[in-house]
Amino acid sequence: MSEKKYNVAIVGANGAVGEEILNVLAEIDFPLNKLVPLASARSLGKTVNFLGSELAIQELTHDIFASEEIEIALFSAGGSVSAEFAPSAVKAGAVVIDNTSHFRMDENTPLVVPEVNPEDIAKWKQTGIIANPNCSTIQMVQTLKPLDEAYDLVRVDVSTYQATSGAGKTAMEELVNQMQAFFAFTLSDAEHKVFNQQIALNVIPQIDVFTENGYTKEEMKMVNETSKIMHKDVALSATCVRVPTLRGHAEALTLTFDSEVEANEAREVLSRAPNLVILDKPEEALYPMPATCVDKNETFVGRIRNDVYSKNMLHLFIVADNLRVGAATNAVRIAQKWVEMEGNK
């Protein structure tokens, strides 16, 4: 019996994440029958490349999911677009995998990282939508899950170093333009529109807007999403920082457990976890860095060490390509797991 193949739409196909979804789909053996790239009317006449062919971008409308008989719709075009058009995709019979924050904290919508809570995919029929978590949350919970199972995690303190691509293509262009201005000795005159501060040769301790409690929305996403994904009220404090890199989010984690933890043993635990790669030979200058994670589908873990004072605390440093692990790869893995769990019934 031949494997069923699916009609797949990518909403926001010519955006930074949409392009990576195309790349990931091209690299894996996904049971694809037809691929339909969608975007706003402004993108009509443009194409995207998939497996050597140029596919014309079609206009995103409420009717196109039914007319193209879409079965899986991958959304990555902003929360307002998902809010307006995802219900139409669901009505047409598609499962929606949404990369935006719009549905993440809806109690009836599963929020999924397949390495952590694949069983939640089974709840998709409640809304027809599966939410993809925040980029910084995904790589973190991939790392937290095996350690929680081994040592019972009680608290996380995390500082992130997030690349400009997390704010989209125009943010990456802003960094490049400012660096060009620096070498032309005109950096002081360079514009900043995406970020509220100069990003070149700088770090900005703000991602998204501040809330009443003094944390930004990005930081609170990590707090709230982690508990929902792990089905556990983990105490978590985050400081999210934008840094002048193009791709690859880095995170420094301080983890507190209910039991004693030993770094070498924890390293072994992490080495057995899916889609984690240990890079932890500091004496050889081998540790995770944004420059070495680009275009990779794994989360890299290093600088694993015990706390100097507390036997139940562990420190580590993790890096992942935010456009892949933090968005496109996780979305495609959700689709793969959905096909495995639901699609071939």
Image: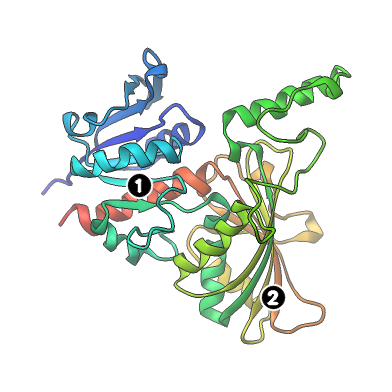
Residue furthest bottom in the image: 259
**Relative side of 212 to 341, left or right:** right
> On screen, 312 above or below 331?
below
Which image quadrant is residue 242 in? Answer: top right
Residue 304 pos. (x, y %): 70, 67
Residue 281 pos. (x, y %): 74, 61
> What is the three-letter code of the residue carrying label 2?
Ala
What residue does disc 1 label?
97
Q: In the image, what residue occupies the spot 69% across and 35% down?
A: 195
> What is the three-letter code of the residue carrying label 1?
Ile
Name the mark on residue 263: 2
Quadrant placement of the C terminus: bottom left
Residue 222 pos. (x, y %): 57, 59
Q: Is mark 2 on a helix, strand or loop?
A: helix
**Relative side of 277 to 202, left or right:** left
The answer to which of 111 and 285 lies nearer the viewer is 111
Q: In the image, what residue occupies the spot 35% across and 34% down?
A: 10
